[in-house]
Amino acid sequence: MSDLTIGSRTYLQREKNPALPPPRLTSGPLAWVRQNLFSSIGSSVLTFLFLALALWIIPSLIDFAFVKAVWSGDAATCRANLDGACWAFIRDKFDYLRYGSYPIDQRWRVDVTEVVGAVLIFWLLWNGAPRRNVAALLFFIVYPILAFVLLRGAPLIGLPVIDTSLWGGVLITLLMSVIGIVFSLPLGVLLALGRRSQMPIVKAACVTFIEFVRGVPFITVLFMANFMLPLFVPDYLTPDRLLRPMIGTALFSAAYMAEVVRAGLQAMPKGQYEGAMALGIGYWPMMRLVVLPQALTTVIPGIVSTFIGLFKDTTLVAIVGIADFLRTVETARLDPSWAGPTISPTGYLFAASFYWVFCFGMSRYSQRTERRLSKGRKH
């Protein structure tokens, strides 16, 4: 009970009024729709236009991809059905799209490599996982050696050597992406720190590398790595034909990553540097413990955008003769035994779905991580 005095009278409240729910248009789904889709006249017009576009495209896509699709059978069955996708073609070529020309009796090595890598990545990305430092040690140090031995082969332990010219498909795309992502971030951080360095030689070298690499197309970097890299080393140290584009991909992505990280470093308040130096913290501990964690958190969207671009740019390695996933799709659709008008659209639709799943997954995980890390910065 509570008292309320007005003038000479006192009113006594015997029962507490129940808490009323918030207005329907200030929270919940209706509020989100109003705020994000119909916040203004222009926003409402765009919402209706995109809705109309979706209603025009999506039913036809669903009809082609699922309703009228051919799920089993042979090429003749697909040629008889011109209105739907030929998923029987994907089923028949699925192993080739995954492994390329990797020997059939040795493909278990690819499966083991991918499963171990997936487990370690899940362990690293799971926020509540125990001993994530152990996962990082295994993924960045032990796993590359294990993957090399399994995929390439080691006669001493009974694994025949598989030439990299036989590798292809999803194996190449995932391998190029993981190598590029794993090496481009630390290299980008070092280049960004070097560009902001007070040492003229270090700064000039980093600026020259970043501006040169960012000033040429990715295809040029791949050609240089493939044809010019062997000229700078002895014949017995010539990198493998698959290692060359990997090096070019990592260096190209590192140059763009350096600019993303540099933006995060420039956004840091000077007080963070001054406070760390006032406590007597050295340069490298200051960067590792104070500056870089905050700077990288700030530019998470840019980092993930670079990763997504790198994942999609791996398709360009086909120019130097590497049979990545998209190249195997191209090769498979040219098989005369599967000639038909719906084979190419089906292959490209499958490839687009593959790339979308991985890119969308990276985007959603980055948004979740950004929201989790930004909670501590909200006032």
Image (cartoon, grey):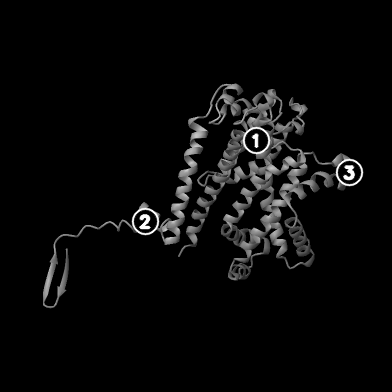
* Image coords of residue 117 (percent x, y): 62, 38
| Secondary structure category for the residue under label 2 | helix
- State which mark lies toward you, 3 or 1: 1
The CA distance from mark 3 to mark 2 is 66 Å
Near-viewer residue (304 or 79): 79
Mark 3 surroundings within 10 Å by alpha-carbon count, few (fewer than 14), some (14 through 19), many (20 or more): few
Amino acid type at mark 2 = Ala
* Residue at image mark 3: 234
Residue 31 got which mark?
Answer: 2
- As helix, strand or loop, the secondary structure at mark 3 comes to loop
Task: Tell me the quadrant of the picture where the N terminus can be found.
Answer: bottom left
Q: Nearer the viewer, residue 57 or 94?
A: 57
Q: Residues within 10 Å of mark 2 (few under 14, many from 20)?
A: some
Say which label, 3 or 1, has the lower sequence index: 1
* Closer to the camera in the image, 218 or 264: 218
Q: Is residue 308 above or below residue 87?
A: below
Q: Count residues near mark 1 (Cα–Cα under 10 Å), then give few for <14, some for 14-19, many for 20+.
A: many
Residue placed farthest to the bottom in the image? 7
Q: Percent from the top left, x then y, of residue 62?
A: 49, 36
Q: Given the image, on which type of amino acid does mark 1 rest? A: Val
Whether residue 28 can be seen here: no
Evaluate if marks 2 and 1 touch, with contact meaning CB atoms under 8 Å apart: no
